[in-house]
Image (tube, helix red, strand yellow):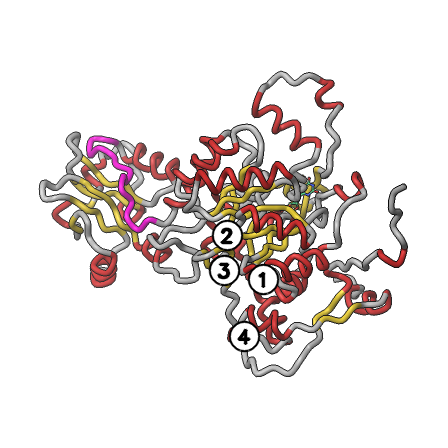
Amino acid sequence: MFNLTSIESIKTGLSYGDVLLIPRKTSINSRRDVSTETLIAKKLKLKVPIISANMDTVTESTMAISMARQGGLGIIHRFMAIDRQAREVEKVKRAEAYIIEKPYTIAKEASLGQAKEDMRKLGVSGLLVASSSGKLEGLISRRDIRFKTDDEDRVSKIMTKKSDLILGAEGIGIDDAIKLLDKNKLEKLPLVDKNGVIKGLITAKDLERFTNTASAKDSRGRLLVGGAIGTKGDFVERALALADASVDILVLDVAHGHSDSVIRAIKRIKSEIDDVPLIAGNVATKEATEDLIDAGADCIKVGIGPGAACTTRLVTGSGMPQFSAVVDCAQIAQKRGIPIIADGGIKNSGDVTKALAGGANAVMIGSLLAGTDESPGYFLVRDGIKYKAYRGMASLGANISRKQLDKMDIDPNEILEIVPEGVESSVPYRGAVSEVISQIMGGVHSGMSYCGAGTLDELRKNAKFIMLTTNGAAESYQKLSR
Ligand code: XMP
């Protein structure tokens, strides 16, 4: 005999769309008066509780750099060779050093045409002019070439000579560099040693970014970045390579995180790497949250099947409505002092506020960010409208790409055996990710003021939800077409 489920024992599961936050008296005067600072692991603080998903159509270094500059975080996906993923992490860590240690140079004998071509190809607005022994001879920048038309002219004729440049000493501190740039209204400050050999370059643009306090940064002022790993094959090697590249957080991410193999993998990673926090998931229940915390996870990622490109619930019949999953997992995680991330199913800024109010410390987003300039890939045009590709990481195409990473010749039978749990699709082009994040956060700030909350802790404390009926949902979401 076995126990059959009784109808009475079946719980109601709620999605974001099934609930609203009840407005309450507020003393928040301005929507800017709120702080969304959050911890996603001990010592890992974000000012914006949004994380871009570790998917191959969402997060590589360009997205991660932009997310960290907004105060959020990007997780570099793992569907690439280990060394490439480590390089992507390094690109983020190097994006905001205030000293360019190896600035691009050109010889003074080179032509103006060559200098223009180098600047265009390298995407820089100036080149240091160096002798064959690496000594600084001058600087050629856009200002010098603006009205010069003869591409055969030599760089030496056009450049600003060393004697007319303000220089910084090797090892100059940030405050002194700012003073020099500010006092002399400089765009570029070449650094040289006592023999005049080039030792670096500081640009006003980099310094401006570096001093941007909104960014998510590590203790050395570098942007924060995460990297994803799996639980099979070379996952330990991958984690070690990411740690070597100075990754700030690892994300052990599989579709069904409540499994023996994930628990084993968490223990293994924690025993090999003790100084990089580990997010583990995905899960959707209290028991799973407890088990992964017991195994050593520093943060739990919640979400089984809510994602826009996920078909797990259709294909397997398994999953959990996301709002209920977040609330359940948060209750256990909070008791244990462990943060959680609500992953997937965010369709608008209101969903972010609901997730945070329900107990999430941050949300992870895929589809809403996939249409931005910073996601990998180009946009496509259909009927005059721009789109960008977006695919589930368990879709057929993503599964095939993964197999191709290991070997180019795939047996067709292997492809027939794949049971996809995701789709390959596209999302509307949305421009810069900074605009998308700014709209989402504007909505969250406003949502917090409706709850009388100045911080995320207050939001969680003050939150009272009401469940919607079919008519309540229609009244809330069915609006005139724009
Ligand atoms: P959104 O809704 O923001 O969700 O697009 C992003 C999250 O979706 C998950 N994901 C998948 N889930 N099959 C799934 O069941 C898939 O193929 C798939 N790909 C991504 C993932 O958790 C991501 O962060």
Q: Nearer the viewer, mark 4 or mark 1?
A: 1
Mark 4–mark 2 CB contact (< 8 Å): no
**Residue that carries the numbered disc 4 in the rendered image:** 454
Q: CA distance from mark 3 to mark 2?
A: 12 Å
**Residue that carries the numbered disc 3 in the rendered image:** 39
In the rendered structure, the answer to whether residue 13 lies left or right of residue 432 reads right
Q: Amino acid at mark 3?
A: Leu
Q: CA distance from mark 4 to mark 1?
A: 20 Å
Look at the image and give the residue range highlighted in magenta. Answer: 97-110
Disc 3 element: strand
The mark nearer the N terminus, 4 or 2, is 2
The mark nearer the N terminus, 3 or 4, is 3
Q: Nearer the viewer, mark 3 or mark 4?
A: 3
Q: Nearer the viewer, mark 3 or mark 2?
A: 3
**Residue that carries the numbered disc 2 in the rendered image:** 73
In the rendered structure, the answer to whether residue 41 lies left or right of residue 125 reads right
